Image (cartoon, rainbow, N blue to C red):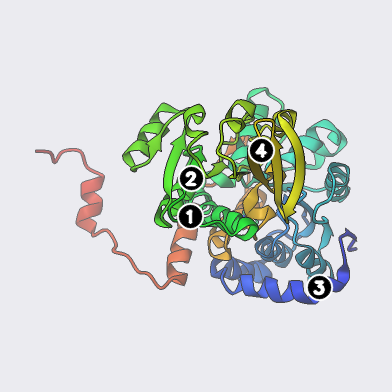
Amino acid sequence: MISHDIHNIKLAADGKKRIEWADAHMPVLAKIRERFAKEKPLKGYRMAACLHVTTETANLMRTLKAGGATVALCASNPLSTQDVVAASLVKDYGISVFAINAENNKTYYKHIHQALDFKPHMTMDDGADLVSTLHSDRTELLDGIIAGTEETTTGVIRLRAMANDGKLAFPIIAVNDSKTKHFFDNRYGTGQSTLDGVIRATNFLLAGSTVVVAGYGWCGRGVAVRAKGMGADVIVTEVDHVKAIEAAMDGFRVMPMAKAAPLGDLFITLTGDINVIRPEHFIKMKSGAIVCNSGHFNVELDLDGLKGIARSIKTVRPFVEEYSLMNRRKVYILGEGRLINLAAAEGHPAVVMDMSFANQSLAAEYLIKLKKPLDKDVHILPEKLDNQIAKMKLDSMGIRIDRLTPEQKEYLASWEIGT
Ligand code: ADE
């Protein structure tokens, strides 16, 4: 039985066209869906998914359903839901969805509970709000859950903390940690979609501007490289010594935020940590500086602190709020500090989500087929499956590569041959 709480079912026709457009750019997922439809590896399993409700996610939901699963989907961020997609998933694809764009916190959590009301055997999370709600408010469901998957770096960090505290009640596959996920989705996906979000919200010109990128993980380096490619002078801030060296050797200026604050025209946080840009930084910024976050949670900008030094706040364009500060300068905050690539743009392009969601699909199948359950810990997908996705993606791109000769294989497995 389908149930839903969405904005407007009448939007379905537009959503369907968009879902099909994305599908045409997700050939690996489409192949998996074809096989799932024949083999039904997920038959009889109920899955609760807490993901950004986008066209790409819609194609993942179709894949899980084709595999025989009953799926309930809720949003993993209040601003990322594409209402047209939610409508089409319900109307055209018979999937239960609980997600409304710009829902408040109370509705966001109500929707998570509604997805959990399906009594899932498996969870699929992006940021770990679903798993955290299960472990705090819905513990009666824990016995019925065999395993889960997690999509993003922030969620993996939270789940590892739960496992370290001995609190994680079922095993999780960290899809984020697959090579075919973070090397591409985090780097090229976030790199492009973050700048896309900034540009859609502001019409900002990167060429000739100074862009401060906080965090040089896979997401930060994606943004830094792409901003440089579009002509920006990029400054990186870091707390990790090794990553700071990498940024320096990649050709970026590296300095503390306190030094970068007066220099930047655009600031982008991608650290996964809290209060990275604080009042002592905001107050030093040039008038007109634009500040946004592309990390998972809206905690990276200290907006309460910013309000404390602001004389007035007004919305000047969709997704753009002007803060007039005590020192008479103006600072512009995008998307309320929520992840700008999904708030003001459409998230990562389907071409990269193809690999991320191939990982999600194969992880679900792997967890169900396991003879012996995994430990209640955070695991990675077996390398064989990761490589299989890479091969399928290359095939879809029409790219062929060399194979090891028998002599090369033997050489790599030997230790006798040296200088
Ligand atoms: N995360 C980042 N981009 C996304 C997208 N397009 N769909 C789902 N999750 C995402």
Q: Residue 206's mark?
A: 1
Please tell me which residue is depicted at 41% across the width and 55% down the height of the picture.
Answer: 231
User: Which residue is the site of mark 2?
Assistant: 211
Give the mark nearest the N terminus, 2 or 4: 4
Question: Type of residue at label 3?
Answer: Ala
Percent x, y for residue 136?
Answer: 82, 31
The answer to whether residue 50 is visible is: yes
Q: Is 84 placed above or below 168 here?
A: below
> Residue at the spot x=43%, y=51% of the render?
232
Disc marking residue 12: 3
Residue 328 in picture, x, y percent from top left: 66, 35
Give residue 222's mark.
none
Question: In the image, which is nearer the foreground, mark 3 or mark 1?
Answer: 1
Rendered view: 165 above or below 356: above
Q: Quadrant of the N terminus?
A: bottom right
Mark found first going from the N terminus, 2 or 3: 3
Residue at 86 percent across and 45 percent down: it is 113
**Could you say whether the residue bearing mark 1 is in a helix, strand or loop?**
loop
In the displayed structure image, the side of residue 136 where residue 300 appears, left or right: left
CA–CA distance in space, label 2 to label 1: 8 Å
Which of the two discs, 3 and 1, labels the residue nearer the N terminus?
Answer: 3
The secondary structure type at the circle numbered 2 is strand
Residue at mark 4: 171
Local packing at callout 3 (Cα closer than 10 Å; few below 14, some 14-19, many 20+) is many
Please state which amino acid type lies under the numbered disc 2.
Val
Question: Does label 3 or label 4 sit earlier along the sequence?
Answer: 3
Q: CA distance from mark 3 to mark 4?
A: 36 Å
Q: Amino acid at mark 1?
A: Leu
- The residue furthest front is 328
Quadrant of picture, ligand 1: bottom right
Q: CA distance from mark 4 to mark 1?
A: 43 Å
Residue 147 in sight from this viewpoint: no
